[in-house]
Image (spheres, rainbow, N blue to C red):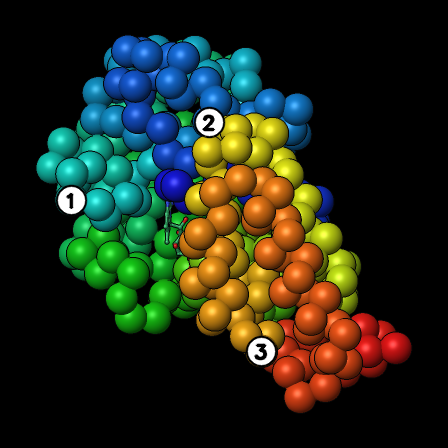
């Protein structure tokens, strides 16, 4: 996820049970032009991370793929992004309107690297044309596809479409879109016929969703506090003290449903250093825990968990 799945957040998701993750989308041009800038987006001391590239030129995509290959468990080609400036350049979701180009991109990336090559698609540009899209991916030799169950034009509106009959295709598939709870995983798999699910905004809402899915447990409030602090520490280690502001996008998730969360979110925007941020987090959670976390118990804390954190 662009702007979100940096190293620190990927590591947090992995710690909580995510089996694999993706880098933010990285433009092939930027890899070729200024590798130093994109290098920090690439996996380091991580396993099972795919590097996602976007672009419109088969040759440049292949060159970029070769450069990032040593960092990547596999290469993922973005043919799904609906952002205007990406579409305008014929990249991302625009490739779904130009399947010949998509085919050439997949083929040339496949030829350039030894690691597997997957493609992130949507069900179509304006309408559902998944058949043509997936047949293109298969023909070009893609090793797997991930399908976001919306069209490009839809962007993020409406409900994601899961009834996709993906099992009829001869390559492995993953389904993406509106998977927020462990129950959604089973339903999305059953309805779509995919072998795997991808969780995007659900991980932003609660990064421990992977523990709920993989280990079948919801962490206690003190564990969530520790996770928040660890995330902050890793963010600063990776990108420096000035990047503390990047933690703001995770605050709503870590404090969701806890009394005073809204005020805390506002206060947190003023945290400029790691120690300021850490003190604020500790104070917020201490207040919550010292108050016995009774009426403020949050929706995602199951009964057993709330009992544990109150004793
Ligand atoms: C802020 C944001 C950034 C995203 N960036 C990317 C990206 O870089 N590459 C990609 O393939 N999808 C990206 N997506 C799309 C998600 O991967 C996912 O397919 C989509 O949000 C639907 O899943 P969800 O309902 O679980 O969020 C992004 C989505 C959001 C909300």
Q: Residue furthest bottom?
A: 295
Q: Earlier in the sequence, mark 1 or mark 2?
A: 2
- Mark 3 vs mark 2, foreground winner is 3
Q: Residue furthest right?
A: 311
**Mark 2 = which residue?**
41
Q: Measured along the vertical axis of the image, is residue 2 above or below residue 147?
A: above
For mark 1, does the 10 Å Cα neighbourhood hold few (<14), some (14 to 19), or many (20 or more) residues?
A: few
**Mark 3 = which residue?**
259
Q: CA distance from mark 1 to mark 3?
A: 38 Å
**Mark 1 = which residue?**
84
**Is 23 on the left or on the right of 278, as rendered?**
left
- Report the residue at 19% width, 51% height from top: 125
Which quarter of the figure is the N terminus placed in? top left
Are discs 1 and 3 less than 8 Å apart at CB? no
Q: Position of residue 203 (x, y in %)?
A: 54, 56
* 118 vs 267, nearest the viewer: 267
- Report the residue at 49% width, 56% height from top: 268
Q: Position of residue 169 (x, y in %)?
A: 44, 48
- Report the residue at 49% width, 48% height from top: 271
**Secondary element at image label 1:** helix
The answer to whether residue 147 is seen in the rendering is yes
For mark 2, does the 10 Å Cα neighbourhood hold few (<14), some (14 to 19), or many (20 or more) residues?
A: some
Quadrant of residue 62 within the rendered picture = top left
**Secondary element at image label 2:** loop
Q: Position of residue 142 (x, y in %)?
A: 42, 31
Q: Earlier in the sequence, mark 3 or mark 2?
A: 2
- Mark 1 vs mark 3, foreground winner is 3
Q: Position of residue 303 (x, y in %)?
A: 76, 82
Q: CA distance from mark 1 to mark 2?
A: 22 Å
- Report the residue at 22% width, 61% height from top: 154
């Amino acid at each position: 996820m662009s702007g979100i799945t940096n190293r620190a957040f990927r590591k947090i998701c992995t710690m909580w049970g995510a089996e694999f993750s993706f880098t933010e989308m990285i433009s092939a041009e930027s890899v070729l032009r200024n590798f130093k800038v994109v290098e920090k987006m690439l996996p380091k001391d991580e396993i099972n991370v795919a590097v996602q590239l976007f672009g419109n030129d088969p040759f440049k995509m292949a060159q970029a793929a070769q450069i990032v290959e040593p960092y990547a468990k596999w290469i993922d080609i973005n043919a799904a992004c609906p952002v205007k400036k990406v579409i305008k350049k014929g990249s991302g979701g625009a490739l779904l309107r130009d399947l010949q180009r998509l085919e050439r991109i997949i083929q040339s990336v496949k030829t350039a690297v030894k690691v597997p090559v997957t493609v992130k698609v949507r069900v179509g540009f304006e309408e559902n044309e998944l058949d043509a899209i997936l047949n293109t991916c298969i023909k070009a030799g893609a090793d797997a596809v991930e399908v976001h169950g919306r069209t490009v034009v839809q962007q993020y509106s409406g409900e994601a479409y899961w009834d996709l009959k993906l099992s009829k295709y001869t390559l492995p598939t993953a389904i993406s879109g509106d998977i927020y709870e462990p129950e959604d995983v089973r339903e999305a798999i059953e309805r779509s016929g995919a072998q795997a699910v991808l969780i995007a905004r659900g991980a932003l809402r609660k990064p421990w969703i992977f523990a709920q899915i993989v280990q079948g447990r919801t962490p206690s409030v003190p564990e969530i506090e520790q996770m928040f602090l660890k995330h902050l520490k890793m963010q600063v280690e990776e990108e420096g003290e000035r990047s503390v502001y990047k933690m703001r996008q995770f605050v709503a998730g870590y404090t969701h449903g806890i009394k005073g969360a809204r005020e805390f979110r506002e206060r947190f925007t003023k945290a400029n250093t790691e120690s300021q941020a850490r003190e604020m987090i500790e104070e917020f959670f201490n207040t919550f825990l010292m108050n016995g976390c009774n009426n403020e118990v949050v929706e995602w804390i199951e009964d057993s968990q709330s009992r544990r954190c109150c004793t």
